[in-house]
Image (cartoon, grey):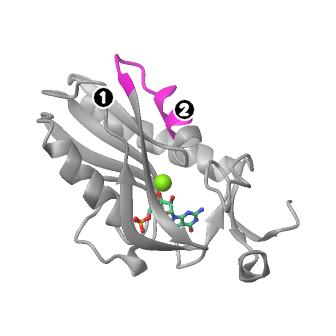
Amino acid sequence: MNQDIAKVLLSEDEISEIINRLSSEVTKDYKNKNLCLLCVLKGSLIFCADLMRRLDFPVELICISASSYKNATVSSGNVEINSLTDNITGKDVLIIEDILDTGNTLSNLIKYLKELSPASVEICTILDKPSRRVKDISAKYVGSVIPDEFVVGYGLDYNQRYRNLPYIGILKPEIYNN
Ligand code: 5GP
Ligand code: MG
């Protein structure tokens, strides 16, 4: 295990079981629809890549960058979204997110997407931290509900590091308190 990790929250095997479950749920709901996966970069890259390879029906992939300006590990509420060049009008958009925390990022993103007239917009997040929510928003598909801890790995970073860890772990507080 990486020495900066205090505890593994989800092992590779546990993540794989989550992906199996989520892909069956998404397949059941979308196999006869116009599914367009919207990968929110960069944190959701690995999750999206794993999930989409379990979907055995036609899907479209588009990517968007959304980032909330941060001081260390806390979201500020100011969210920057790059505009989409892909057309989502009339499509069933499923936002693929790494973690739903305060809800600021996704509520801003959904407001932006709805102006582009998709047929539907739903959220699939691998992690959910409901204890910190400030916006009235919830995900249709949730991998795992986690406590209020700062986690990294499986795409999630701290200062652009740790994204390549194959598991999701709690970062030792001394790493970001220094
Ligand atoms: P929100 O806008 O819902 O507060 O935050 C969503 C974004 O904050 C996530 O997409 C993620 O980039 C970041 N975030 C929130 N909690 C964590 C965490 O525990 N670890 C990491 N690495 N990022 C987090
Ligand atoms: Mg994110």
Indicate the quadrant where residue 178 lies: bottom right
Pick whichever, 23 or 162, lies toward us: 162
Region of the chain picked out in magenta, as a range? 48-61
Callout 2: few (<14), some (14-19), or many (20+) C-alpha neighbours within 10 Å?
few
The answer to whether mark 2 and mark 1 are in CB contact below 8 A is: no
Callout 1: few (<14), some (14-19), or many (20+) C-alpha neighbours within 10 Å?
many
Q: Where does label 1 land, which residue?
A: 36
Give the alpha-carbon distance from disc 2 to disc 1, as whole Å.
14 Å
User: What secondary structure is found at the residue carrying circle 1?
Assistant: strand
Give coordinates of residue 104: x percent, y percent: 33, 66
Which tag, 2 or 1, sits closer to the chain's start?
A: 1
Specify whether residue 29 is in view: no
Q: What's under tag 1, amino acid-wise?
A: Cys
Give coordinates of residue 41: x percent, y percent: 49, 43
Indicate the quadrant where residue 128 lies: bottom left
**Residue at 43% in and 36% down:** 23
Q: Quadrant of the N terminus?
A: bottom right
Q: For disc 2, does the CB lie below 8 Å from ligand 2?
A: no
Q: Is residue 18 left or right of residue 114?
A: right
Q: Is residue 113 left or right of residue 175?
A: left
**Residue at 25% in and 46% down:** 122
**Residue at 15% in and 44% down:** 114
Give coordinates of residue 101: x percent, y percent: 42, 69
Classify 29 as above or below 153.
Answer: above
Give coordinates of residue 167: x percent, y percent: 70, 53
User: What secondary structure is found at the residue carrying circle 2?
Assistant: helix
Q: What's under tag 2, amino acid-wise?
A: Ala
Q: Where does label 2 land, which residue?
A: 49
| Disc ID at residue 81 | none
Total count of labels: 2
Q: Is residue 36 left or right of residue 147?
A: left
